[in-house]
Image (tube, rainbow, N blue to C red):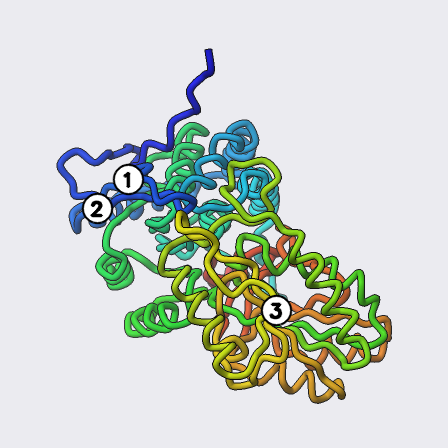
Amino acid sequence: MTPHPPAYEDLCLYIDGEFIGAQSRSSQPVLNPADGSLIGQLPSGAAADVDRALAAAERAFRSWRLESPLKRSDLLRRVAQLMRERAPQIGRNITLDQGKPLADAVAEVTGSAEHVEWHAEEGRRIYGRVVPARLPEVRQMVLREPIGVCAAFSPWNFPFNQALRKVVAALASGCTVILKGPAEAPSACVALARLFHDAGLPPGCLNLVWGPADEISRRLIESPIVRMISFTGSVPVGKLLGALAGQHMKRTTMELGGHAPVIVCDDADVERAADLLAPYKFRNAGQVCVSPTRFLVQRPVFDRFVDRFLERTRALRVGPGLEPGVNMGPVASERRLREMQAFADDARATGGDVVVGGARIGEQGNFFAPTVVLNPAPGSRLMRDEPFGPIAGIAPFDDLDQAIATANGLPFGLAAYGFTTSTRRAHALASRLEAGMVNINHFGMGPAEIPFGGIKDSGFGSEGGTETFDSYLVTKFVTQMN
């Protein structure tokens, strides 16, 4: 007898240590992007739920901020252990509601356990300092203290990892947090709440709310209880939330969109570059803020690079994420599907050559073919706006200065990539590319010990590395005369 597959996550709110189901609340459907089927109902919180979460977080902060860093560290380590044990089921549910291949979804969960452990250790090393005084009877100290209740808004493309980073940074710092997760892919955040609950996190330290994004974000940001806001998402929404936070003098971290340039020089290992870049471009159906999107290839090696890149692109297998051997799943929603078609149509209309893909696959599910556009017009949408999907533009360049100027010519500044065997060119790329993260000859972003963040319209503040705590701590100077 064939066993039934495990059920999808029982979606709920999590407030003050209590899981709250739909009950009499309104709810919204959660759909599988691979076939459009209904897989769950997400309960919508009301203003009273948000207010209860605020009160719980404020009360919990009074004690959590005083908890021993060693005890906070032990709890986070228990969370990491549970995370690895539950990764197969959590990953399956991510594939169901977000669409990425199962192996990638499980890896998102298991990889996140390392972030928990890193914060568990680094949270024990949040140090102040003693400053030598000008008078012998004076003692001067600089203290680092948790800022208070934090509001976190996490995206749907990496629904577990992105929420987890915010939660562990806040908790390891001694803060409490209210999380508003992505309604499109909600199972990961609910699973996250269960992990912390089962590990013994005190009630109120973590709260999870759902509901209309504009109403909840405004209520949280305008509340005097919330002292810090962390947002990952699009540039337009980030600017709106940042402006609202500024009206209330709230500290923010913003990890916003990108439109990452790639510069491949004529002295690069061209085949290796193409072999690395093609799967990286179409990872998570291109729905990655650091996805390489604008490819600038020096003319003498342009054809070689294109041939290899197209070979690797055509070899990708697209399908439902639960099917074995699938490299790329569907885009997350019908809206993303329409956006991808609009980008491809605009590329054609402006003179670009769509050599692979450029259209939806089939009639069921949100599948869009991996798409490559050669010689896209500089003014085309693809070379101007972040596509956030499985489409890449490849254009030739002659002079490195020209390529760097093109790469820096947009207001984005999250990630950038360069491939060269010349130390002189590598230095030029590292020092002149305007991005928060520059990768040369490999992809080095993402580990827990590395700061992740952008500049310009791509935001400010870092998640990961010792910089991760900067936004969750305030600096207090104490001077005392005996």
In the visual, does 427 lie left or right of 119? Answer: right
Q: Position of residue 174 (x, y in %)?
A: 45, 47
**Residue identified by numbered label 2:** 45
In the visual, does 315 lie left or right of 6? Answer: right
Amino acid of disc 3: Val
- Does residue 210 appear in the picture of this structure? yes
Q: Is residue 321 above or below residue 299?
A: above
Label 1 to label 2: alpha-carbon separation:
7 Å
Secondary-structure class at tag 1: strand
- Does residue 169 appear in the picture of this structure? no
Closest to the observer, 6 or 230:
6
In the visual, does 288 lie left or right of 29? Answer: right
Secondary-structure class at tag 3: strand
Q: Position of residue 110 (x, y in %)?
A: 58, 38
**Residue identified by numbered label 1:** 13
Q: Position of residue 268 (x, y in %)?
A: 83, 70
Q: What numbered label is drawn on residue 106?
A: none
Marks 2 and 3, the one that precedes in the sequence: 2
Occupied quadrant, residue 402: bottom right
Amino acid of disc 1: Leu
**Residue identified by numbered label 3:** 355
Determine the residue positioned at 57% across, 79% down. 352
* Residues at circles 1 and 2 in contact by the CB criterion of under 8 Å: yes
